[in-house]
Image: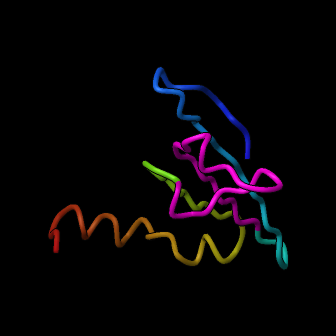
Amino acid sequence: MLVTGVLPNGHLLVAGEKQIGVNQNVDVLRFSGQVDPRAIGAANTVQSTAVANVRVEHRGRGAAANANAVGWLARFFLSVMPI
């Protein structure tokens, strides 16, 4: 986790990324949010309940991610007859 900025009230903007590779698939988890510096504990840790405006993004590459993607034929039918 890195501090990417400091707000005028002193709160820290933090962001981090983790890549997990399993069986030729790569999952990327991105996390960002705001932390009050007073919430930083021992060993520079912060409780998850002390992070505000959290944003979590999950992306995948590989066979597992492709299996969950909507195919071109399904996209066509959804554009003609939306659910």
Q: Measuring 65% from the left and 31% from the top, which residue is drawn there?
A: 4
Which is nearer the eye, 60 or 55?
55
Name the foreground residue: 4 vs 20.
4
Task: Please state the horizontal and vertical placement of residue 55, each as a whole percent of the image.
Answer: 49, 52
- Determine the image quadrant of residue 60: bottom right
In this rendering, would 36 be left or right of 20? left
Front residue of 11/54: it is 11
Q: Is residue 7 above or below residue 38?
A: above
Is residue 44 rendered to the left or right of residue 55? right
The span shown in magenta is 26-50
In the image: residue 38, left or right of residue 77: right
Q: Nearer the viewer, residue 80 or 3?
A: 3
Q: Quadrant of residue 15?
A: top right
**Vertical comparison of 10 with 50: above or below:** above
Question: Residue visible at 37% across and 70% down?
Answer: 73
Q: Residue 66's spot in the image, x, y percent?
A: 60, 71
Up the image or down, 58 lies above or below 39; here it is below
Q: Is residue 70 magenta?
A: no
For the C terminus, the quadrant is: bottom left
